[in-house]
Amino acid sequence: MNYLNAGAGQTVTGSCHWLELAGTRLLIDCGMFQGRQHAHNRERFPFSPSELDAVLLTHGHLDHIGRLPMLIKAGYDGPIYATQATTEIARITLLDAARLQREDYKRSLHKARRAGREEDVPKPLFDDDDVTKTLAAMRVVAFEERLELAPNLHALYHPAGHILGSAFIELDSSDGRIIFSGDLGNRESSLQQDASLPPACDVVVIETTYANRTHRSTQATISEFREVIKTALARGGNVMIPSFALERTQVILAQLDQLSKDEDLKLQIFLDSPMAAKMTNLYRSCANEFVPSIVNELATGDDPFDPDGLTYTVSSSESHKINDIHEGAIIIAGSGMMTGGRIVHHLKHNIWRDNASLVVVGYQAEGTLGRKLVDSMHSDAPTRVFLLGDEIIVRANVHTLGGFSAHADQDDLLAWLAPAEASKTVLVHGELSVMNAFKGVLEARDQQVLMPSLGEQLNLS
């Protein structure tokens, strides 16, 4: 087994793993680098795309699929295997990514022309045509369905419990068995069913996003969320919830729906994200992956993703009208790490108000605006941020809730790893300090642990 880390090596973004197994060259995920790592997106792949035999996707988050159109542009012309839901998610997220790049390029080019520096503006990484070619290459694989990749190599997709359609991938070959976890789910998820457990294997490549901590319990998190929302609304200002369009938005909608019912509250909620609206519709059509309570609600027509008082704002003009509201609005918008999207202009219009609230419900990577705002909670000095060209002081109350995470924590990861009994465990998709902590835990259990850096090759046989 020859392995090359082409992404998510000692960092939490850009998942991409090249593997030569039983004479077949595979790629597991092909994600976009985000945050401080974004410059890697413009580097050449450290392998030959045209020599790949197949690409297998664990799930549809952009940091796991965002470089697929670039892979196609670079010469890959084989199949891309994914679950049905992941295929549908990819259609939404990749087209949206192409649109955002196109719009950013036009804005940057307009500014550069005034300074005579057009040549300094990098072109989009890919466009709609590249996405169309990518989607045409996708092939649907069902959970637990044997996928023959070569005469001596097959794959099995198992539920990972992370987001809709998420899977961990088992590869069985004449060279041995290796498992790629993708992103594993929180066993206390309020939406997704638990991940399946892996079979015994030779090697596990496992994510480590939250491998150094234990999440708060779901019930404690829900209770805290309710108190935060009620307190924030009582302050009189608006409540901003930056949220990833996929999974986190649906969790928040379901919690607001239950809160309004239990407390008999009349809420004014704006879902200011066209992509989140599309994802929410997709969630309604894929109820079989959810916990029983959500399945039952959808079956009886009591839509948990449609709380009373919810308004979808699709157009830019509808989004801008929210700025006329200075109190009592709950605004859910992307991007989840506040690196762009509509949440930025809501921050600009609200975060300087001392009666406003920012509720952070997702992971904030190093180098992002979201991380800076979360860090401001622990600073005595005033925090100032640049938003859409203006310097803004942060006076809003900032709250963080980690228990809604769709990622496994340390206890989840250890429980999942136990039946695998792997001779080698490869840590990926985590910050270096987190990986080192988890490595110590595993080595104390006499496990051999590897932590490849970006571009590092390993012989896993």
Image (spheres, rainbow, N blue to C red):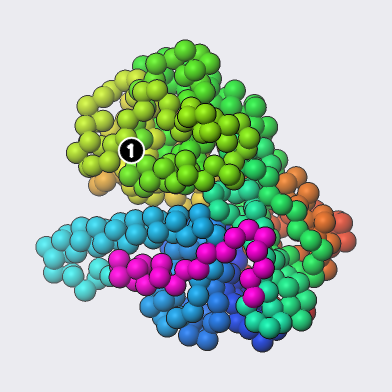
Mark 1 — residue? 272
- 302 relative position to 180: left or right: left
Residue in view at x 24 percent, y 58 percent:
103
Q: In which quarter of the image is residue 417?
A: bottom right
**Above-or-below relation of 117 to 189:** below
Magenta-tinted stretch: 126-148
Residue in view at x 82 percent, y 63 percent:
200
Circle 1 packing at 10 Å, graded few (<14), some (14-19), many (20+), is many
Pick the quarter of the image with the C terminus: bottom right
Residue in view at x 37 percent, y 72 percent:
133
- Check the image and name the residue furthest to the front: 300
Q: What element carries label 1?
A: strand
At label 1, the amino acid type is Asp
- 43 relative position to 101: left or right: right
- Check the image and name the residue furthest to the top: 264
Residue 354 seen: no
Query: Residue 419, how many percent across, how many down?
Result: 82, 56
Residue 135 in the magenta stretch? The answer is yes
Viewer-proximal residue, 92 or 442? 92
